[in-house]
Image (cartoon, rainbow, N blue to C red):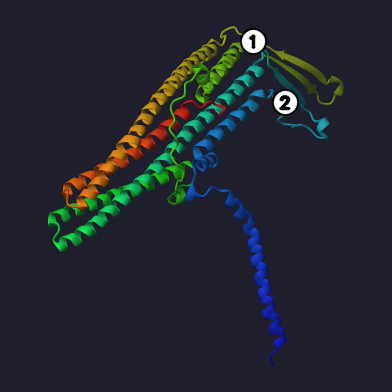
Amino acid sequence: MRHPIKRRNLQTAIPYHLAAIALAAMASLWPLSGQAASVPALEQLTLQAAETLFTAHNRELLIARRTVEGAEADVLSAAAPLNPNLSIGTSRISPSLGIGPGRPTEKRVDTVVGLTQVFERGNKRELRTEAAQFNVAAARSDAADAGRQLLYQVRGAYYDLLLAQEKLDITSNTADLFDKSVAASERRLQAGDIAATELARIRVEALRARNDASAARLERERNQLALGYLIGAEREAARITVIDRWPSDQLPQSVQNTQHLIDQRADVRAAQARVSAAEKSRDLARALRTRDITGGLQYERFPGDTANNSYGFTVSIPLFTRYQYSGEIRRAEIELLAAQENLERVSALAVADINRAGRELATAAERKHRSQDILLPAAEKAATGAEFAYTRGAIGIMDLLDARRQFYASQLDTATATADHAKAYAAWRSATKSSGD
């Protein structure tokens, strides 16, 4: 016998059950959808979004941060006071009788309990702490300098990908133009307007244009991978499409106080911090000649007679009769000289970096202006005139192809010059970046 009522209950219960599951799934996915919305879209990646992803996911930058954390942990070790030592000794254990019967206090053994503590003198602990703190400052400046250089790589990779996208557009448009020319030339050949050799030449140029488009597509994929690795998105590099325009014309700014700018660079500040750390290490090495005192307390228990139990104390002072720590002091002084020479080297490299970046930016801006405002319009005008003249039979196919090649080369040169200017401006920003920027 069937039960229609129960069947209806089951049919109505199933949709409610599925709805509950759907609501639970939507609730679990809601935080993920909100998180995904905050992540920049790789298909429309701006330079600012790329820099944000770089700051959060670049592996080299994360390693540099871990180095800073390790240096901070060294400060805790350097500032920690020395621990006391507890010693317990037992003697007069008889091989034949052992330690005897009874409670532990009645055993036939002597027991000595001692407590010793080393008291450092000469501000050794303070000097160790200060040296470690300067090493932390150096590590932080190193991390900032690594971020400066990596950020320049991100900007360069971004502009390389933007250039590759433009090259792909130029080569694809040129290939499409030649494909249309081949189709038109085939119709004209059938009508007897041109010779077969003209069609063959156009076909050769069309094949070259397709090869250039394939090479440009491969170049874009390589640049997508390069940028994807820097921003931690190498697994989804094929999705990356940059959308920012090229930066406007920028000329090197006149620096009023070059020395102040150099002193504020992260690499210079790191070298300065290492000089300070080396000075503290030298002072610490000299402080080794200040004798540390070891103090101790002692309790000795005698078996059977508590009246004979005794207390005592000890004081230990090292005698510098044979060695005065001259090797450690000399080594610390040499390391200080090396740190000072390294500071001079880093400062000189910073000066050269700033001057070189300024000259390269000025040259790149001039080349961009010449290519964009003079070369490209002239080549475009010549190509347009050649197309018009060829359609009316005023020039031959070779003149048309020459004009197209010049215009095509001018487009690529202009795109390359624009990208070189953008990367030169990024290099200038990196060279003049201070540690606080």
Q: Is residue 106 left or right of residue 172?
A: right
Q: Residue at x 13, y 57 (%)?
A: 196
Please tell me how many numbered marks the rendered image carries: 2
Between 87 and 93, the one nearer to me in the picture: 87
State the mark number for residue 86. Answer: 2
Quick one: 279 or 286, which is closer to the camera? 279
- Residue labelled with disc 1: 290
User: Residue lying farthest bottom?
Assistant: 1
Q: Amino acid at mark 1?
A: Thr
Residue sitting farthest toward the right: 307
Element at label 2: strand
Across and down, in percent, residue 427 comes to 43, 30
Question: From the viewer's perspective, is residue 109 above or below residue 61?
Answer: above
In which quarter of the view is residue 137 placed? top right
Q: Would residue 404 be seen by someone viewing this image from the given angle?
A: no
Q: In the current view of this chain or complex, which residue is farthest to the top?
A: 321
- Decide which of 312, 308 is in the foreground and name it: 312
Structural distance between the alpha carbons of marks 2 and 1: 25 Å
| Residue 257 higher or lower than 407, as above or below | above
Which mark's residue is nearer the viewer, 2 or 1?
A: 1
Q: Which of the 4 quarters of the picture holds residue 166? A: top left
Q: Secondary structure at mark 1?
A: loop
Task: Return the x and y of residue 66 as percentages of the image width and height.
Answer: 56, 35
Residue at the (76%, 31%) spot, across then down: 99
Q: Which x, y percent locates residue 152?
A: 46, 34
**Residue 262, percent from left and from top:** 50, 20
